[in-house]
Amino acid sequence: MDTADIEGDLTEVLYTEGQIHARIAELCRQIEADYEGRDLLIVGVLKGAVMVMADLARELKRDVEMDWMATSSYGTSTESSGVVRIVKDLDTDIAGRNVLIVEDIVDSGLTLSWLRTNLESRNPASLEVCALLRKPEAAKVDIEARYVGFDIPNAFVVGYGLDYAERYRNLRSIGILAPHVYS
Ligand code: XMP
Ligand code: MG
């Protein structure tokens, strides 16, 4: 789906498909260098990270394992509470593994902070975070994300995996959702 199909629902396109792919390629070169000679397990957080996982995994010029987790946060549709429940856990025992969490977005940071603590307790050899987007102005907790695609303004964004009420995930670009859609 192209932005033209939902014109009026976005106030602005922040990143086109081409810009997203170019940035992911840069992140992949860093990841390849950092993990050279070590195993790598990337963990995607459903459902928002599906697109970035698919593109990142295929862009990586190395062997990589993929696993998935699904969490649900108690909160409103546009704001998370930090109280997280595991809906689907990993299939992989991550003890001794080099784990890279792949997220669509770090907003308040509450979800990732919880997830990091949870996965850390399983004793991985290493644990890092790759987030395509980050909202620095929205941070409520400090998240150490080694790989970040883009820092964005504090606005609700959709597309490329990110949804509002399960819509817009299949948009190829990322844009700011017009307030009239959710108010
Ligand atoms: P935080 O960091 O606040 O974010 O715990 C938790 C999850 O909320 C979703 N999220 C968004 N989804 N547009 C979206 O479509 C946004 O602007 C946005 N901000 C947060 C996302 O799933 C994130 O993992
Ligand atoms: Mg998410």
Image (tube, rainbow, N blue to C red):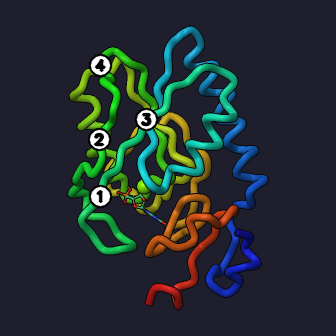
What amino acid is at disc 2? Asp
First in sequence, mark 4 or 1: give its number: 1
Question: Tag 3's secondary structure?
Answer: strand
Q: Which residue is mark 3?
A: 67
Circle on res. 147: none
Q: Earlier in the sequence, mark 4 or mark 3?
A: 3
Residue sitting at x 56%, y 42%? 53
Q: Nearer the viewer, mark 1 or mark 3?
A: 3
Measure the alpha-carbon separation of dots 4 and 1.
24 Å
Measured along the vertical axis of the image, is residue 16 above or below residue 44?
below
Dot placed on the residue nearer the N-terminal end, 3 or 2: 3
For the residues labelled 2 and 4, the Cα–Cα distance comes to: 15 Å
The kind of residue tagged 1 is: Ser
In which quadrant will I find the C terminus? bottom left
Q: Residue 158 vs residue 122: left or right?
A: right
Residue occupied by mark 2: 89
Distance (Cα) linking label 1 and label 2 = 12 Å
Q: Quadrant of the N terminus?
A: bottom right
Q: Residue at x 64, y 64 (%)?
A: 174
**Callout 4 amino acid:** Ala
